[in-house]
Amino acid sequence: MRYFFLSFLLFIISNSLRAQQLSTFSPDKNIKLEISVDNGFAYYQVFFQDEEFLAKSPLGLISSAGDFTKGLKLVANKTNKIQESYQLNRSKVSQVSYKANEINCTFTNTANDIINIIFRVTNTDVAFGYLIPKSKKNTGNCIIEKEITGFKLPSKTTTFITPQAPPLSGWEKTKPSYEEEYTREEPIGTKSQYGLGFTFPALFHLGNKGWLLISETGISGNYVGTRLSDASSEGIYTITFPQEGENNHDGPVTATALLPMQTSWKTITIGKTLKPIVESTAATDVVKPLVKTSKIFDSGRASWSWIVWQDESCNYNDQKTFIDLAADMKCEFILIDALWDVNIGKEKMAELVNYAKSKNVGVLLWYNSNGNWNTAPQTPKNKMNTSEARRSEMKWLQEIGVKGLKIDFFGGDKQATMKLYHDILVDAAEFGLNINFHGATLPRGWERMYPNYMTSEAVLASENLVFQQGFSDRYPSTATIYPFTRNAVASMDFGPVFLNKRLHREANKGTIRKTTDAFEMATAVVFFSAVQHWGLTPENLKEKPSYLFDYLKNVPTVWDETVYIDGYPGKYCVIARRKNTKWYIAAINGENAPKNITVNLPMLKGKNVSIINDGEGQESKFSTKKLDNASFNLELSANGGTVLYMP
């Protein structure tokens, strides 16, 4: 009997050591996070309103400070309530009230090495990251070789995600650059196009349960940019580090930092509808400003010759024409794209900057990021890749009065490249230059971290409307995916608003635009970018009705509030945004058939509004109306749109 009792006691003790579990909730109790250790392996699980949104998913990493993927024990945990208010001045919202329940879990491995996993749970998001502390045993630098962090989705989940491109692929070996097509409700487990997994953000439709968006934030050169693997047979997507060939083999694929070492934050936004995903501020909630400056960096709209008139327009006279267009449209900027150094030259560029200044237009200049990580011939190049060259160039730019830079062709997510983004932003802030990255990674919290960060491409953008008729044909549908994916987490420089019937300088050449004029007007609101580069050309002002341009002269590019109204990725999207007291509501139809949608717009009840909607063919029509009630019927043409705004 005594032997049986001792055996039973040892069994209980053994199991208590082997299986550990704790949980925490969102402030409103709708989200439940469970953290567990089973047989030495750490897991987490996420529930929303008692339904499982993420099944038991793995946690852990392998580092020079210890292997934290197995043999783990949960030895302590500490809870905290986070409550913070902060401002953003270049985002989709301006005032954020951040409330989260935090649980900091301390784990040890069999060698008694220590790691902390910090979770924060808001009413819409779960964010977590790893912290490896400094200890007597582990000092100095720590190298993280891999994460095993995973996300186990329900079995019938479908996806809206983009595949990772192979390194040194694409035009002039410039990929990967987050410029691939989105999947459209593919079943989880479907192999990615190149067999290399998927980039962030990743949107998942959990059927009747709702929606889930996974992304990453909080990287400033301290970590690699990660991605998702292809799903395992169990439906688990795991975190994957960069490929060796990225950035032309420049730098290791691992992450290195001085202890204590904080990884990036992984964010999970969930809801029954897409509303939490459109309105989430998870990307900025868990980061802090990194650069202090008294300088003011302006957002705004820009004219841009290259998108329709292409390389040949990068000459003094054409750029002067587009400066005049910017002035006529009350744009804050003109973007002068690649090859300006060869076709215009520094001396004449100084003249152009002065001419633009006389028109109250700021100049933005294009640069190639290159050291040696691509073979793109566009210049100027080798000006941004080293500190000495970059600071010398930025000093000259500051002297002649340039306002900002568009820097292109980065080609990877290694820590060396993430540090290059950071170094460019820090140096540019000192010289009073705002920054736009193209051919680039997903921005990860940068709208709050850097005062001069404006926008990034990191999406299959409007240049493809010019390059590919197929993309132009798919664009109405594709445009309705972006607000729920890429543009939900950060500023996105797509380069919208086209009024040419054919996207070429000559009227009878180029790809054919498939969207209506009202659709194009709506993208000025549906797409958020702190600097918005229009696809307008000078002849548009003569060919189209003046009310379109009156609207574009006043539409903001940064917002005080963003509200999801309705939508479904690939089909349609309706979003409301507010600047000061004025609301703009924009709708786009992604399908090649007319669509009637009744929406609830309480912010416009009893207000006088101006309406741009679809007329005959691609043409638009304009009206004004007082909305007596909150209900409004949107009549959208095939590939059409509507904008309602307060004059």
Image (cartoon, rainbow, N blue to C red):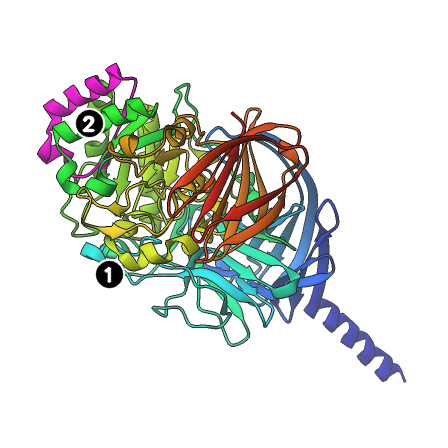
Is 356 part of what is drawn in magenta? Answer: yes
Q: Residue furthest front?
A: 616
Question: Residue 274 at x, y = what percent?
Answer: 59, 51
Residue 9 drawn above or below residue 377: below
Q: How many marks?
A: 2
As measured in the structure, the alpha-carbon distance from the residue carrying label 1 to the one carrying label 2 is 36 Å
Q: Secondary structure at mark 1?
A: loop
Q: Which mark is residue 516?
A: none
Quarter assignment of residue 293: top left
Question: Residue 140 at x, y = what percent?
Answer: 42, 46
Q: Is residue 453 left or right of residue 352?
A: right
Quarter assignment of residue 243: bottom left
Q: Is residue 128 visible?
A: no
- The magenta region covers 337-366
Question: Residue 150 at x, y = what percent?
Answer: 53, 63
Q: Which residue is mark 1?
A: 169
Which residue is located at x 28 percent, y 48 percent? Answer: 463
